[in-house]
Image (cartoon, rainbow, N blue to C red):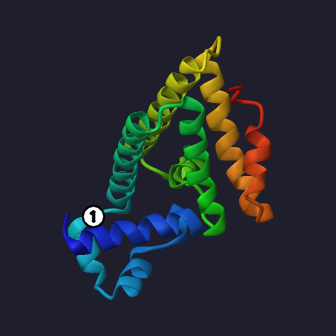
């Protein structure tokens, strides 16, 4: 990936997490990076192409993070706590989960991006289900869905209140070690 392409993706991700994907334009990206909009169009012909690249990169990053956690952290409860800590970090930066933000803009994103978001959340739920299975939960897929739903919703509330502890309070009781 070229340096310009990486800078575009990094900035677009940050803006999506703070303003929403519809909250910025190629003009905003170009002005911030110091390039022409034609340079952005060279890499991402349409904003839908940019959105798809963002989700694909994020999905790959989270899958790699899950693999590292599975290898490096022996206890599934500790793996779940590590994910929560990561997501809570968004609150101090006044951000939200990028894929959660894009999913909230469902009506204005392309079918390809919707499909990529569904794959992201399905992969996340599958990983969570493995953790809950390892913890001996009787219905890992159901609790994984409840967990990710609570995590995403609590991020919204924590951001609104400026209080990352909302996430902890919301997820309290999911993990019984």
> Looking at the rendering, in which quadrant would you find the N terminus?
bottom left
Q: Secondary structure beneath disc 1?
A: loop
Residue 112's quadrant in the figure? top left
The residue identified by callout 1 is 44
Residue 50's quadrant in the figure? bottom left
Q: Is residue 80 above or below residue 28?
A: above
User: Could you say where residue 34 lies in the image, as x and y percent from the top left?
Assistant: 33, 88
Q: Residue at 51% across / 64% down in the picture?
A: 16
Residue 115 visible, this angle? no
Q: Is residue 91 above or below residue 66?
A: below
Q: Residue at 38% across / 40% down in the picture?
A: 63
User: Could you say where residue 74 lies in the image, as x and y percent from the top left?
Assistant: 48, 32
Q: Residue at 32% across / 73% down in the picture?
A: 7
* Left or right of residue 158: residue 64: left
User: Could you say where residue 102 lies in the image, as x and y percent from the top left?
Assistant: 53, 52
Label 1 crowd (10 A; few <14 / some 14-19 / many >=20): some
Residue 75 visible, this angle? yes
Of the pair 53 and 7, the residue shown nearer to us: 7
> Looking at the rendering, in which quadrant would you find the C terminus?
top right
* Left or right of residue 42: residue 152: right
Q: Residue at 65% across / 23% down in the picture?
A: 143
Of the pair 170 and 68, the residue shown nearer to us: 68
Of the pair 137 and 56, the residue shown nearer to us: 137
Q: Is residue 41 above or below residue 118?
A: below
Counting the numbered discs, the total is 1
User: Could you say where residue 148 lies in the image, as x and y percent from the top left?
Assistant: 62, 36
* Left or right of residue 61: residue 19: right
């Amino acid at each position: 990936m070229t340096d310009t392409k990486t800078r575009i993706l990094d900035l677009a991700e940050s803006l999506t997490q703070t303003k929403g994907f519809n909250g910025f334009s190629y003009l905003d990206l170009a002005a911030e990076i110091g390039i022409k909009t034609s340079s952005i169009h060279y890499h991402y012909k349409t904003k839908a192409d940019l959105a798809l690249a963002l989700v694909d990169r994020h999905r790959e990053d989270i899958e790699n993070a899950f693999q590292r956690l599975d290898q490096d952290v022996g206890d599934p409860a500790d793996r779940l706590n590590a994910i929560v800590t990561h997501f809570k970090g968004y609150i101090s930066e006044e951000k939200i989960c990028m894929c959660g933000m894009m999913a909230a803009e469902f009506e204005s994103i392309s079918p390809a991006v919707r499909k990529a978001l569904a794959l992201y959340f399905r992969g996340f739920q599958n990983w969570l289900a493995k953790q809950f299975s390892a913890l001996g939960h009787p219905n890992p897929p159901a609790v994984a869905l409840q967990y990710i739903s609570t995590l995403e919703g609590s991020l919204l509330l924590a951001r609104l209140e400026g209080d990352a502890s909302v996430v902890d309070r919301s997820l309290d009781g999911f993990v019984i070690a």
